[in-house]
Amino acid sequence: MRRFPNALLQKLSKRAEDSALRELPAGNSLVDFSSNDYLGFAASETIFRETHQLLSDRKITANGATGSRLISGNYPLYAEAERLVASFHNGESALLFNSGYDANVGFFSAVPQRSDIILYDELCHASIRDGIRLSNARSYKFAHNDPEELELLLGKFAIEGTEIYIATESVFSMDGDSPNLETLAALAERFGAHLVVDEAHALGVFGDHGHGLVQHLNLQDRVFARIMTFGKGLGCHGAAILGSQVLSDYLVNFARSFIYTTGLPPHSIATIITAYDHLENENPAIEKLRDNILFFNEEMNRLGLKPLFVRGKSAIRSAIIPGNEKVKDIASKLFEKGFDVKAILSPTVPEGQERLRICLHSYNTKADVSGLLNTLVTCLT
Ligand SMILES: Cc1ncc(COP(=O)(O)O)c(C=O)c1O
């Protein structure tokens, strides 16, 4: 057996001591309040069958892309999907990436240049932060959803010849809240900066047909780039960066996570096309999800739980319960009662901000929602 470095073993032990050791969960058949499958598309047999039909109608039998899209891995379904995604989102161009992680890493590592500045919300997703770490640009965070601090930073850095990129999310993945995108767009315009919005948790949730929050607010022409990820509301896999045609051309040439990786298999692209088709055609799941979000908020208020929760209107509702031990204990009690809710521990979130992250879905029943919140009340007392 090869020796495993001591320093790494110590890091693992420290994680365990802090009750923060990450372990892969076994599957379960509890009530789902943890997955990102907001509309139930991941489990949809209809989407599964239609995807296969699409592939067989086009006589596509390939299992894999066979290479990078720049070498042998590009095929007509890709262009079709990119046209569809761009048109659905009222954007000039869409470029598909293998995942949201790849899209953010690719964008932030390639677009901002050495003399540029990135200003990012302190709660931006790890994929945005990893992209920023790979970038040559200088970066500064601003307090979560704080346009005043952002304005101060913009005032400080807006000088001739420096491009400024502002990074935010339309729904924050851990808090489920949203920035005031209109204010951010106005600030970006005032200071000549570029606004970049990750819409991972807004796709399928906000806007007619689940278009996302940017489109819901009609801001698409005021945003430099939008990152749409397909592993959440769309229930499949992959991501797109929406922006101008020249942005797509630039990313094809310089985004390393786009260039140096095998393209997605046709099955993935066909699923993306089918899932978008379901958003386009008035999917009742969107309405059901919205109903459940409203019902959750009503029940939360009725049971006096409001002070515990981060404010938000999305499908992610977070109850702050400080302390890894405490939040894990409550999550395991909920688990015993049949509810799959994940405890989010530090260091994933800052110490003191540990939380239960409750994801709502179109397929949760009102009884599920009431049952969960009533059980939470008993766990807290
Ligand atoms: C805000 C945000 N952006 C990007 C990603 C990454 O997306 P993907 O799962 O497609 O890699 C996630 C996933 O957790 C996310 O929450």
Image (spheres, rainbow, N blue to C red):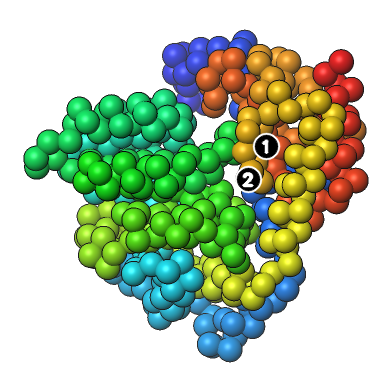
Q: Position of residue 227 (x, y in %)?
A: 42, 53
Q: Amino acid at mark 1?
A: Arg
Looking at this rendering, what residue extends furthest in the left direction?
160
Whether residue 256 is visible here, answered yes or no, is: no
Name the image quarter holding the C terminus.
top right
Tags 2 and 1 touching, CB below 8 Å = yes
- Count the marks: 2
Which residue is pictured at 66% across the width and 14% down the height?
Answer: 323
Q: Name the residue nearer the viewer: 155 or 357.
A: 155
Is residue 146 shown left or right of residue 320? left
Is residue 334 shown left or right of residue 93? right
Is label 1 within 8 A of ligand 1 (CB to nearest ligand atom)? no
Q: Amino acid at mark 2?
A: Ser
Q: Position of residue 187 (x, y in %)?
A: 31, 41
Which residue is pictured at 41% across the width and 63% down the height?
Answer: 96
- When asked about the image quadrant of residue 324, the answer is top right
The residue that disc 2 covers is: 314
- Depicted 316 relative to depicted 285: above or below: above
Which residue is pictured at 89% across the width and 22% down the height?
Answer: 378
Q: Position of residue 171 (x, y in %)?
A: 53, 44
Q: Position of residue 57 (x, y in %)?
A: 58, 89
The residue that disc 1 covers is: 317
Q: Name the residue nearer the viewer: 30 or 261.
A: 30
Q: Name the residue nearer the viewer: 147 or 205.
A: 147
- When asked about the image quadrant of residue 175, the answer is top right
Secondary element type, mark 2:
loop
